[in-house]
Image (cartoon, rainbow, N blue to C red):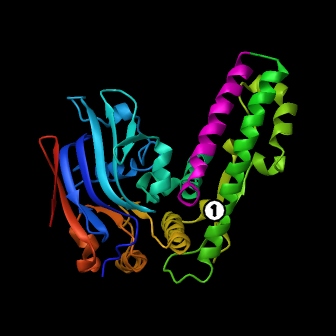
Amino acid sequence: MIDQSNIAITSLNLSHFRSHRAARMVFDGRPVALVGPNGAGKTNILEAVSLLSPGRGLRRAGAEEIARRPEALGWKVSAELRGVAGCHEVETWAEGDGARQVRVDGKVATQIALARIMRMVWLVPAMDRLWIEAAEGRRRFLDRLTLSFAPDHAEAVLAYEKAMRDRNRLLKDQVTDAHWYAALEGQMAAAAALIVENRAATVARLALVQQGAETAFPRADLAITGPEDEAQGDLATVWAAGRRRDMAAGRTLAGPHRADLAAFYAAKGMPADQCSTGEQKALLISLILANARALAADLGQAPILLLDEVAAHLDAARRGALYDELCALGAQAMMTGTGAELFDSLGTRAQVFSVAEQNGLSTVREI
């Protein structure tokens, strides 16, 4: 039986969105498998769904990059969905090369409003190297997990980044007026306190939900490291004392924007960056599932999961285990794959859509 209480998209419409000139899909709450050859436009659909949450989506593309070419008329994504506290109509779009706009239930809204009505997490192939590349990607991953638990996290991050940009401008211009710095550092400190608190709560919640969980994927222990630990919560004092050093660097050198996320394969006591490629992927899947289980327990509703090419590097047993966990959660997981056989073990538990490309146009049909 389909769980009608979970967060889910019930219909999705795309207009001039990348390779999709026009597409409409209707969903019934089951997991969704999007199948077709590489380049057909499967990931474009996931990207469109990801823009129903705050931020730049799973590809981190600017609004001007998304519009179908060569028309460059702009683009639009509209959806009907069951959210945290009811049903909504959501639209997001950009005209020409303009900025992205959002409307919820017919009224202009901010992107942050989307975080309050939706919960969404994703895993894409670009994240397979998460544990061995730069810390910036790990911070984004942590903040995306955190946002699913704390919608106000987006506001705190935006406030912090805006004040820090203004402070960095003063530093680059060699401004020495302490009053200007004190005002900005006060704003940064207030936002930073919430960011640090939210991140710590997320790591603790994921640790708790993984204890004793019945899952085929390895437990990942997480730890936040970086300058925010050294500051021990008194970042305003650190920034005031470090102005001369920061001025020489031309940027702010301490704060939550410098934090890192460390992960460990718990059963082996091994840092994630020393694990095999397959183990690193399994740890990521484990964290996404833990995130979904925690939200299901806290809200009584599982989030939407976007899993791009998630089955490609899993053997049949692991694929089956993943699908069983998703179905047990009742989550609307949207997955892509090059062949329908990758989703055979889902049987009738999933909707399957074929995505094809011809003459530069993507088409979608349920099969």
Residue 353 position (above or below residue 170): below
Residue 141 position (above or below residue 111): below
Residue 105: image x %, image y %?
Answer: 35, 48
Q: Is residue 192 visible?
A: yes
**Disc 1 secondary structure class:** helix
Q: Which residue lies at the image location 58% right of the left edge and 65% below the top edge?
A: 275
Residue 74: image x %, image y %?
Answer: 28, 32
| Viewer-proximal residue among 148 and 283 | 148
| Viewer-proximal residue among 75 and 256 | 75
Name the side, left or right, on which 359 lies relative to 88.
Answer: left
| Viewer-proximal residue among 272 and 35 | 35
Residue 159 position (above or below residue 337): above
Name the side, left or right, on which 139 lies relative to 74.
Answer: right
Q: Quadrant of the C terminus?
A: bottom left
Dot 1 amino acid type: Thr
Q: Give the quadrant of residue 174.
A: top right
Name the side, left or right, on which 324 lies relative to 357.
Answer: right
Q: Residues within 10 Å of mark 1 (few under 14, many from 20)?
A: many
Farthest residue to the left: give it. 359
| Viewer-proximal residue among 151 and 200 | 151
Residue 70: image x %, image y %?
Answer: 21, 29
Residue 241: image x %, image y %?
Answer: 88, 32
Q: Give the quadrant of residue 261.
A: bottom right
Q: Quadrant of the N terminus?
A: bottom left
Residue 64 position (above or below residue 151): above
Q: Which residue lies at the image location 29% right of the left edge and 66% below the top edge?
A: 32
Q: Main secondary structure of the magenta part?
A: helix
Q: Is residue 164 magenta?
A: yes
Q: Is residue 255 visible?
A: no
Q: Is residue 283 magenta?
A: no
The residue identified by callout 1 is 202
Q: Which residues are magenta?
A: 147-173
